[in-house]
Amino acid sequence: MSLPLSTERLVIREFTLADLDGLAAIYADPQVLWWEPAPYTRDQTQAVLERTLERYRDEGMAEYAVTLAASEELIGVCGPVWREVESERLPELGWDLRSDEWGNGYATEAARGVLTHVADLGLRRVYSLITAENRRSQAVAGRLGMQVERQVVWEGEAHDLWTLDLT
């Protein structure tokens, strides 16, 4: 399934530079980005957005914009990014949603939609790095059918490495 893709309530598409203000609002929320260095400034978010656009071009995938189908309003980020994890290059499926949209099932819905896309890209397995404290993301991973494979240290912090086979 190619982008943009539609789910019951969402449209998932590639980011554009026009998304900077909406993305900056998401990344400025300390409930969304609680690790260091966070929350992000607008300049930090612009750098992230520019890197995302480079990843589309260079790697064929990256995190995608999650918008409400009814309004096209940007409410989050979901998608695969290549991460170096303990000397392995792994496709990490991640998600971040505006905190005022938590509890609506959007993260799970977006991730399920993105999983159809990444399978079409040829990925056979995805991973998610989730800290022990991040209960909401653990719940999303569980609803997706992911399971903890092992604990890893990523960027100096312990994470559970959740996995899902796509085959």
Image (spheres, helix red, strand yellow):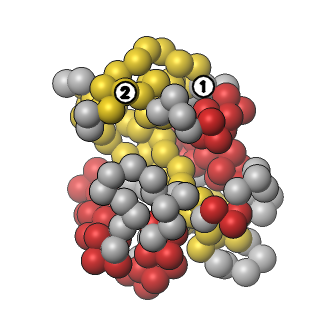
**Residue that sits furthest to the top in the current view:** 150
> Can residue 46 be spotted in the picture?
no
As shown in the figure, which amino acid type bears the numbered disc 2?
Answer: Ala
Give the crowd class for mark 2: few <14, some 14-19, many >=20 residues within 10 Å. some
**Residue that sits furthest to the left in the current view:** 87
Q: As rendered, which of 109 and 157 lies closer to the eye? A: 157
Residue 126 vs 36, above or below: the answer is above
For the C terminus, which image quadrant? Answer: top right
Q: Which residue is mark 1?
A: 146
Q: Earlier in the sequence, mark 1 or mark 2?
A: 1
Left or right side of 166 for 28:
left
Badge 1 vs badge 2, beta-carbon distance below 8 Å: no
Residue found at x 31% / y 65%: 48
Residue 142 x, y percent position in the rendering:
67, 28
Residue found at x 48% / y 15%: 149
Dot label at residue 76? none
Left or right side of 57 for 113:
right
Residue 45 vs 89, above or below: the answer is below
Q: As rendered, which of 160 and 35 lies closer to the eye? A: 35
Q: Which residue is mark 2?
A: 158
